[in-house]
Image (spheres, coloured by chain):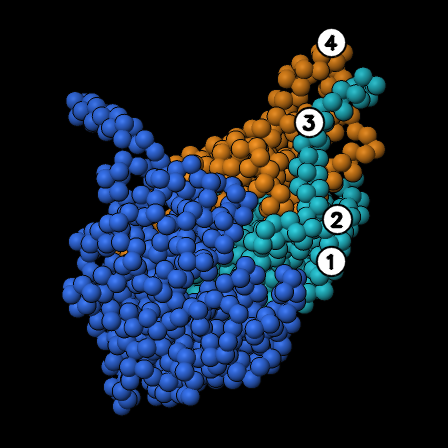
Chain colours: A cyan, B orange, C blue
Amino acid sequence: MATRHSRSAARLMMAPAVILLLGWMLVPLTMTLYFSFKKYLPMRGGDLGWVGFDNFVRFVSSSAFWPSVTATLTLVLGVLVITVILGILIALLLDQPMWGQGVVRIMVIAPFFVMPTVSALVWKNIMMDPINGFLGHLTRAVGLQPVDWLSQASMPAITLIVSWEWLPFATLILLTALQSLDREQLEAAEMDGAGPFARFFFIMIPHLARAITVVILIQTIFLLSIFAEIFVTTGGAFGTKTLTYLIYQRVVESQNIGLGSAGGIYAVILANIVAIFLMRIVGKNLEA
Amino acid sequence: MARAVTTRRKTVNTALAWMVAVIIFFPILWIVVLSFKTEGDAIKAPLEVLSAPWTVESYAVVQERSDYIKHFSNSLILSLGSTFLGLLVAVPAAWSMAFVPSRRTKDILMWMLSTKMLPAVGVLYPIYLLFIELGLLDTRVGLVIVLMLINLPIIVWMLYTYFREIPGEILEAARMDGAGLRQEILYVLTPMAVPGIASTVLLNVILAWNEAFWTLILTAANAGPLTAFIASYSSPEGLFYAKLSAASTMAIAPILILGWFSQKQLVRGLTFGAVK
Amino acid sequence: MSITIRALLGACAVSALAIAASAETITIATVNNGDMIRMQGLTDDFTAKTGIDVEWVTLEENVLRQRVTTDITTKGGQFDIMTIGMYEAPIWGANGWLVALDDLSAEYDVEDILPAMRNGLSHDGTLYAAPFYGESSMVMYRTDLMEKAGLTMPEAPTWEFIREAAKAMTDRDHDINGICLRGKAGWGEGGAFITVLANSFGARWFDMDWRAQFDQPEWKEALTFFVGMMKESGPAGYATNGFNENLSLFQQGKCGMWIDATVAASFVTNPKESTVADKVGFALAPNHEGVDKRANWLWAWALAIPAGTKKEEAAKKFIEWATSKEYLALVASKEGWANVPPGTRKSLYENPEYAKIDFAQMTMKSILLADPQHCCVKPVPYVGIQFVAIPEFAGIATEVSQEFSAVYAGQQSVDEALAKAQALTTDAMEAAGY
């Protein structure tokens, strides 16, 4: 069906998207690369000349670098695990017959509509604040000392906030996939004596594999660049400084554009490693 | 065909599902409650909060202090504008990827997605300088373009997965009947793709509405959407829970309502090709 | 129907007037503190006087800093007036990014502005930002709890006294903490507090050769003292408490003492917000026995005009209005003297009406005691008390204070934190070319 004519037409149609994204990627990337080889301090007169790989060396030799990579991966993995597992369970639950399904579904997907700054603010103050927050009041009501979430359990707290934001997305996709599952196949398996666990692991999970990969792929893309949730809650303290946040600190707080740009390049490399890794697993799963 | 479900099982399901739903929804519910309380009452223990008198005081204060309508209309323009522009660019691209796939289609798609992984803070200065050069700072046009570019990969990918599910034979048939490329897209493809496009639009409006990095850094007095509106209510001096709750409710209500009305579409549509 | 028409006509007339009057509109970026919100509410007075319209961009402090810094360093020109602090003003002024405020009108009476504030907002003797409100820090304490503990707060206490008093006031069964202090990470939060505390123990950030001083015994003594005192008498989870959290604790009667910004005085004595409004006493910030430096800082939120704005004249008019004596009188007439922006003008403290307010004199004394030119016992190469007025400081101090906060949260030891602080400061200073 693909004639030469339609091929060139296809290229033409793809062109605007590709060119735009290429520009969106290349122009800032080139500028970032340029800055990363410079000593560029806006507060001290701006461009202070070329410095070779100094910024790159300095960025990784900082004591904050490796912890930030670990923090990034911990956060991304934590959120992925929580949202996928809870997402499957909730999707299974929502797929069952019940009263008020519409309302339940609405409530479950609602966090997806809340902007990240708002959810971070709400969780930090109104929920997790040890003195005036809801959870603080709750723990005191049962006679316990309230937990200061954001210092005592900072990473779990941020993981919780981000998972809350993304759980609806995972649930939605998994639910859609679950609804397309062949009921007869399930019933046949049941007749053959397969218990609920066997049915879950041998029929449902393989069926959901594609949906799970999609959830992982899309969420990873968004999670790698998580910023607002950390900015609002801990400001990078208590081991929650991700790579993105470290770059922010170098660029905005320290006003060292060269150093921050070098960090940006590292982040691009990390993103590409993750992308290649994802492509290996997702690519296979997404082949039609 | 479907097995009769016992009432008992349905009751258990219902109870369980409602419990889960209420837990997940609770923070949102709670800010709506707090937004109708005074500052002094909003920090009290939950039961005292509920028994405290209801008031719209906080909404009045927020309304007096900031121009909600301006921020709201900016949010509306930015999210709709960027989605529309995104569709304009993405539909042809997704169409050609779906119907004239080449060996590199998958790679191009993945590359597009990977552009989303660059941390925005890393390119803050380059983009800001570019915006100054182009005179786009604090303009809606500039932000529409940025939001469109940010979400373009997702749009292309979603549309691609929808288009791919449209059987190619139908297009062949249309072509046999002498339909040109334009007619093909307009009269054959579009109607079949409407549900997919609708879901795409929905998701992108949500993503654009909630984008909070560029919309804050690239705006001042003119183009700031609701994310900028919220930034003036976080942790000022003194008590602020009620005002923060009122402002948050106002910022998320429109998109929440849109989401509720279209939840069926979302539930069916958000597949990203995950359902074969 | 006719009402609608009349309303419409009225609206048209008003908007016509507005168009006629608003020859110019200036855009002001400001922080969402109470005094600034009040100023926004009073903008109409300015517009009525000058015909200049004002557009406000009100942001939370951290977002504001990020926003205005990006704009000024790139010369983005998004704002005609920026609200900045005592840290930014001299640095930006030195870079030529701000319009010098050296031709303010005679009736504005720039000499009336407290010299400490003027110096802090100047570079090489030129004023670059006009203070909107100024603050130092002081002790606020509960008179009733102090009495119950059988103690009397001297006007100028020592840290040793404070620690003993805090211990005596602490009653954890009744949710009363002897002392509430900032532990929150961030250079302007816990970083500012621990720096002034260290100053009063004889420590300093840098020696005359710009070498970091965290490996010196004074820092260790100061940090150990702070952590020990907070363990004895501080609230649980103080590692995330900043100004706002402590304010709320104090207002709810959960603190015996609180050492923080002098502007807090009007909040804790306001019966509408505070449950302890009539039981608050004030004292100077403490010093360590034998050290001749008190732990009080100096800060001002000020209005500055970015160089290159096309609306310089209108912006200057606004600054003259917002930081004038008349503005103070305007606020006083609407909200009472306790609510006027404090700490900027001599005449305010000479005003008998203002002198009647409890905390006015202590605020004034604290401000006069603070000397940004000489923060520390030992000589230093820098200006600033709770900060070091060099561009690299905000980044460094935020990271250092994050290490300290981890100590407060019990996640590392004082020695570990100081070693890390020393290493990262040295590294950042090297990167900056010192």
How dense is the environment of label 4, judged by Cα within 10 Å: few (below 14), some, or many (20 and up)?
Answer: few
Q: Which residue is mark 3?
A: A16
Q: Amino acid at mark 2?
A: Asn
Task: Say whether disc 1 or disc 3 marks the residue closer to the N-terminus.
Answer: 3
Task: Say whether disc 3 or disc 2 marks the residue closer to the N-terminus.
Answer: 3
Q: Which residue is mark 1?
A: A54
C132 vs C375, left or right, is left
Q: Which residue is mark 2?
A: A272
Labels 4, 1: one chain: no
Q: Nearer the viewer, mark 1 or mark 3?
A: 1
Q: Position of residue B188 (x, y in %)?
A: 66, 18
Q: Amino acid at mark 3?
A: Pro
Q: Amino acid at mark 4?
A: Gly
Residue occupying image coordinates x 75% and y 48%? A272
Labels 2, 4: one chain: no
Disc number placed over residue B178 in the picture, else none: 4
Q: Nearer the viewer, mark 2 or mark 4?
A: 2
The outermost residue toward the bottom is C150
- Cα distance in 3D space between marks 2 and 1: 23 Å
Residue occupying image coordinates x 45% and y 58%? C124
How dense is the environment of label 3, judged by Cα within 10 Å: few (below 14), some, or many (20 and up)?
Answer: some
Q: Position of residue C187 (x, y in %)?
A: 50, 65
